[in-house]
Amino acid sequence: MDLFDMDDVVGGPPDECSTPLKEWRLKLQAGTLTRNDFIEFFKKESPKYFDYQNELDTVKCMFKEALAKEEIIDVLVEFMLGDNPKSALEKLRLEGNTATVCGKVFKNGEPTYSCRECGMDPTCVLCVNCFKRSAHRFHKYKMSTSGGGGCCDCGDNEAWKKDHYCHLHLDNRKNPLESKIITEAVLERSEICFSAILSFCVNYLEIEPNASLQCLDGEDMGLGLDGANYCTVLYNDESHTFDQVIQTLTKIAKCRHKEAMEIVAAIDREGRAVVKCDTFKSCNDLKTAIENQMIPATGLLANPRNRESLRTSVLHINSVACQQFALQLLSWFQEFLVRHYLFRKTFSELVQRKQESFCIRHILEYDVKLWKTARTCWHRLLISGMLMEYDNKMVLAQEFSRRYATIVEDFINDDHDHAFSIVSLSVQLFTVPSIAHRLIAMEGIFDKLLHTFYYVAIEKFILNRTLHFSKNIASLTFFKRANYILYDLRYLLSLKPDVLSSELRTGFLEGCKALMRVLNVMQGMESITRQTGQHMDYEPEWECAFNLHIKLATTISQVIEWASTDKMLLHKLYKMTVRALVSNNFIVGAAGGDEVEARSVAGHVASCLVYDVLVRPVSIHLPLTRFYAGIYLHLEAHGLSYDSLVAETEVLNIKLTPREIIEPVLCTHAMIAQVAAGMWRRNGYSLLHQLYFYRNVRCRVEMLDRDIVCLQIGASLMESNEFLIHALNKFNLIGWAQPNYETLLAESSVDEEFMRQLSMIDEFLELLIVIIGERWMPGVSLVSEEDRLRKEIIQLLCIKSYSHSELSRALPDTTGGNSDSVFEDVINTVATFKKPVGADRKGVYVLKESLYDEFNVYFYHYTKEDKSKAEELQRERRKSKKELVCCPPPMLPQLTPAFTSMANILQCNVFLTICTLTMDRALDIRSRCFSESHVQKILHLLGFAIQEELSEHYPFLSFYERAQQYGILDKLEELARCPRLEAHRDFVLWTIKRFKDMQAKQAPAAAAGPSGSQRQSMGGEELPLTSEEQARKEKETRAKLAAERRAKLMAQMKSAQNSFMKSNAEMFANSDLEQSSGSGASSYRTAPTMGGSAMEWEDISDDSLEEQGAAALAIKQNPACLGPNRAPYQAQENSFKCILCFENCSINPDGPPLVSSAFVQTSRVILTTPGHYDGKSGMHVSCCGHVMHYKCWQEYYSNEESKEQRRHHRNRLALSHGHNVEFHCPYCRALSNIVLPVSEPLGGLIPGHAAVPPAVGGGSSENYLPLDCFVEIMRTLAGELAAPAADSTMWQYPSVLRKSNVIGDVAQFERSVQLIEKPQLHPTCTDVMSSFNKALQNAMLSQQPNAAAEGGVGVGVGVESDSPYLVFDTCSYTLESLEIYMFTMRKPLKVEMPMRHQTCTTNLVRACSLYSCWAPHRPELAAKLLDTIFNQKGTSVLEWDCFRMLVQLNFGVLNLMLRESEHAFLPSGSMFDFYMLQTMFLANVTKAVICFDVEKELAKRRAKEEAGAQTEFSQLAYVEQLPSKIQENMVAFYRSYNVPARMRQLVQQKKLAESEEKQNQSPNQEQTVVIPCELQHLALMLEHVRYQMGSFLRCACLFYRCMTDVEFPDTFPLEQPDRFDLMCQYLGLDADMGVYFDMETVFATMMHNFASHPHVLRQAEQCSLGYGDPVEVLPCLRPLPALKKLFDDYSDLINSVSDIFCPNNEREEMKTPTMCLICGEVLCGQSYCCQPELGNMSVGACTHHAHSCGAEVGIFLRIRDCQVVYLGRGKGCYVQPPYLDEYGETDQGLRRGNPLRLSQYAYRRIFMQWLGHKLHEEIARLNDNANVAVTQWHHM
Ligand SMILES: [Zn+2]
Ligand SMILES: [Zn+2]
Ligand SMILES: [Zn+2]
Ligand SMILES: [Zn+2]
Ligand SMILES: [Zn+2]
Ligand SMILES: [Zn+2]
Ligand SMILES: [Zn+2]
């Protein structure tokens, strides 16, 4: 069915001529319509939508895009598509043939995905949408974030090896290319519109810096020079900093700082901003002023551009308007083009018209004249318009290539970032292989790129045909920009073709010629000459040359790679290289370079080039020679060889001898050896840096590695003896190789020169080992690239176990990151991956055991440290395996035929002479020219030789025979006995063993015969022991000796003991007696610490306990801390050492006060549940517990304080007032900002007569007032306190007692409250406490400056900053946090708490208790509290935090009843303290009962049963045995107060009433709905209540233990959960729930009182019927705090914010989306657009958020770079993010791009740090350790 009706596409005839649309249509019909009609329209219309306002001195401009869209663009669309453009566009969409390629242009920060299995190169990426719909999702992929500007390659055949399309684009491919909507007529109209758009935009967007007056052609609009119709526009550049521009604006344009910041942010974002709208004159004056402003260069980075002025221009307002509109038009046009292929076709045809102003060529070339946004708009347009179709892409690529030189030059001279230059388009074009190849073949782009590079980047540095960058640092930026050409080159060559066409080959060779020219000037660049006499004056510049090398190295490798596949190419390139080498005059062709002299060793003579490295220049850079070596490796595969090619080149009269090939490399290596020998010390660090990079993984592939190949080429082409003589000569070692060296040497003394000589020998031998041994190089021996990688990995893993990231960093990145899969394959064959253990560890690779045999200690990529580390490990390993302790050489792979002759070195005369000479000298005691390492290296070389012979790869090799001639074996055996070489004995033995293997194989006859060596082996014992055997033998001897000694000693001791026992018999008897009569209780406690005899002690004490009877045991095991049965206070020892003065100090009331440093912070950790506690925060105290004198501390503190102030002054950080100064505990460095008083146990302050005695004899309760009296007194007190005109005498306790009609006397009361004489404290004690209080106030004010009265409405009594309740609330908040922390950690009460928790809570509670006696009286607060609790005024139990109120009640009330200063009520466990607990306990029970929801609980139960869990009614048996009266009471209580029950009842009642109404029954007959309540329900309810009481009871236990110092009984469980009954027992409460429902008791009355509060009823009504205000219910159990639940897959997380916009500016994408892990909000972090104000400072969005969300701390996840930040009060730190890859590693900054998953373990660690209030501490710790640059954390 065809849904589409074609009629509405056709434009009807015009009705009237007033609208432009109709005008156009008419003109179209008349054939007179031109693009100018549209352009004029744009010009006329756009100024209407430009608007500006002058606010103060700052102008605010805006372009009303929405209106402009409606009035201009929509009209245009209607003209193109017909009368109903909307439906036409919709139909177009439904046709679904937008494109078969995605081409989505990435925004900055958008995630991109590349496939490691299928991507052609790492630049091939997918957008999220395509990735999610593609097969690559299941492959090994990498993730990263785009820098902006690239585009999605989905659907590009050349980007992927397979799975080219995602589902979406695969579907699109099936659709036809034509459209029913886009008819010829539409296209005709579109063409005119398009051309109008393009020419309008091209004309208007160009920046015209000096065109100010030309804009006056707007005169026809009636605007003259005088009107305020001009704008000063400021443009972006990359050379001025934000601050510089802000400074200019505030100084010259007189902007305020904040506005200046906004303008600068806009300039940065868009590339320009209008800074003034005024008359031409004033605008122009401003422009001149800004331009004349000289901005001083910033610091060291002296950029010449820096001294340039800011770019400005004065434009007519209309021009600005047209430009703004042009930008909008371009963006719209880009989106429009995406809609259909035919639009793009039209577009592409248009821009190919060469005569037009908007032809591609012009667009490309005028890019540099635009500002940032304008450029981006054009780039996007080109991408959408030209890159979706292959043909268009080709056209663009060709045009781009033709203009390349111009654009690049513009780019280099411009200063915008690469991403904002049209040059960045190259990655889209050059990475498409077929296009790249065509460009090389047809456009000569390879040549052009290098040609351009040569002329723009390096030509000016050429001196004497060689590059010298010298110290021209200023050229660095410019040089860096030019290096982008080399990136382009890399793209171009990234894929080599399978077959080369002749054009491609020609084009490629042209490029190679240009490359040769570059390499030619690089050969020998930055050459150095050994400095003698004095040090270098300055460190020569070296980085430029290395940068050039690094940038070019990939290209060199690529060119060699290309050449390796094509014989003709290789052939020509070889000749080209030889020609270049011959023409180059570095070293070989140097002046006098033909001078040779004859040198001879062991009867062989070689004519060596005279070139002394000690005095002539040498260089690290030999790219031409190395290129030759690279090419040479591929000759053989194509049947070519040096010899066959020599003939050819000689015809051309160019000759390159092997000697000439190796000479430059040999010189460089001689220099390197001399540096190692300390002969180049005066050349400074620059040289050392160069040598470091020479072997560094980033450079060595085209440096060190090629050099060794080059020497190997020489070794294979030259006669072996000759080669060695050349090398010896270059190292100045010819003399050493002569037998008479020793005698010559004897004449000279042992000096530094001599030591250097020894070192040079070492270097020479090592080079020889490398030349022979390092042949894991395809082309040198029969190995593949994988083998090469394998060898590399094995050697690395011999140093240590590597994590995945370390390993990939340590390996060269040869194929541009795509070697990943190869790497993975290889690594898995050689190593096993050990999974990470714990959160801190990474997983590591461990080498497979068998592969340690392949270890080569002289591996050429090892540094000195690597070598010694690996050697040590290898020796240990072999020792533990009981093998010879040495590092023998590994077996070598077989050489390729071209290199086979290299093996001959191992048997040539010079080699054997060197070996024997070295061994002889080692054996000669008098010899001086010898070192152990020489021998070690000689052994290594001999090992190579023996193994090569054993391998039988080389028929010409007869090492055995040759060795026999030189008597090698005899010498070896002598060496084995030589004491001088003991350290290497095992190695010698290994060599002998291998030698004999060879002997047995090679000459069985000889082995059998009575040869010299045979004799030796017959008398095998003569051979020395291996070090292993020797060690064992020694050990045995030692052990034997030791055993003997021990036996002797034992015998002596025994006799001594016996005689001692005899003489002291009596004493021993007594001590036995004492032990058995030890007093039960105390010994029971101390037993385990008594050391050796603990066992006996315990046995005895158990016995004695049993005797005392079970009852006593029960009391002892279950002591109560409160109530009639409370255990008596037991004095404890309390002496400390002051950590500052080290004096002993014990706490007593009149002694000097002691303190402990503590840290107070505002906290919302337990208040972050969404929906509760909005805006509230508490205060948390932590304390390390180290004790010091208050006086000592004061001294320490004032010191720290002044230090801190100095530091702040230096850092110019505003020391925000009100904050407590931070310091560290002098002992443990714990972060602190206050001190907490350390006081003695409260029980110790109560004199014996006042203390509550334990219940002995039972009758004691009469001594006290009962609970109901307490309640009565409290009620009365509330009334008295609140009475108007109250005076303090009214609430003195005798008066209150009287009024409350309590039966009982004053003495009873005084006993019940434990009235004591006020303890006399040291005068400064009160100082401590008030400073503590002051610190709390500071902390609270800094977080909630105006929260004074809001502290905790509804939860208890509101707290003002100056109220004593602040201290008490801090106490309760700290205890509640601790309870939740412990609960979350699954730790019960009894578990041993860390000292910091223990001491912190104890000190805090004791301090509060003492403070309550001195605190300022606040009767109104106490009145409110008492009224709330006892008089049902104020809030109801539903809204209470019962524990918090308990603490307030306990500390804040009683002392009001005392007005005189001699006495005090010290809260320390009196009966009244107990009653307070009972009251709040009952309140909490009431709350639990009335909130209990039976249906919910039953449902939970059912769910559990369904899940297969056993459920039972644990309380059912208990309920059943209760008296029926109690049961009835429970039911009644439940029915009348339970909120859910009442809710249901009300709802059913209402329904019933309604249905009755319907049935017209009279409403008089009231039927009452009765909610069912069975015993099962009651059982369930009690179970629920017991569970709900958990948190309250645990807090209370912690609290009263600190107050009474009664330990938790041993019956407390050691594993969670803590038990209800045991906690009740400890607190003196009745755990028998039935008791509380007994109507006879005061309990039931109190519960009824609590439950009958009007709010409770209102809650039920509100929930069911919806009237009344909702009550803010606080659940009994606080919801456990939790951090935001994160996506398991990191890419889900990153995608979730890919389209997020800044909350302040909906047009701006969020650059650094940052998630608050506490609440989950995503913020615009660290950005100029979001800088809210906090106090009077503008801060980053995160800082602002943290202030309220986390009460000054925050945990943020920076989503795009996967980093977690802790923020706290202007400070912060980075911590490990919780996302890990499969190797257990994090990826901060997404550099590796491996898929990341959430690690629960790591996330929990962050959670625990937050929950434990340790963030501030962690921040301080990390900032202390890391010496990082000061980050402006508050901008975060
Ligand atoms: Zn895509
Ligand atoms: Zn796609
Ligand atoms: Zn794939
Ligand atoms: Zn002290
Ligand atoms: Zn401490
Ligand atoms: Zn938050
Ligand atoms: Zn923002």
Image: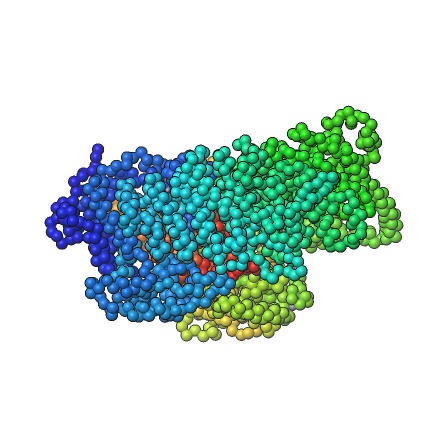
Q: Is residue 944 visible?
A: no
Q: Is residue 1015 visible?
A: yes
Q: At x 71% / y 35%, what residue is drawn?
A: 907
How many labels were placed on the picture? 0
Query: Quadrant where the N terminus lies?
Result: top left
- Closer to the camera, 1210 or 37? 37
Residue 651 quadrant: top right
Q: At x 61% / y 56%, what residue is drawn?
A: 685
- Closer to the camera, 1351 or 548? 548
**Residue 756 appears at what percent x and percent y?**
71, 51
**Residue 1149 appears at what percent x and percent y?**
62, 69
Q: Is residue 178 left or right of residue 290?
A: left
Q: Is residue 1303 left or right of residue 108?
A: right
Q: At x 40% / y 65%, what residue is drawn?
A: 309
Query: Quadrant where the C terminus lies?
Result: bottom left
Establish if 1681 lies above or below 1006.
below
Q: At x 50% / y 39%, what residue is drawn?
A: 573
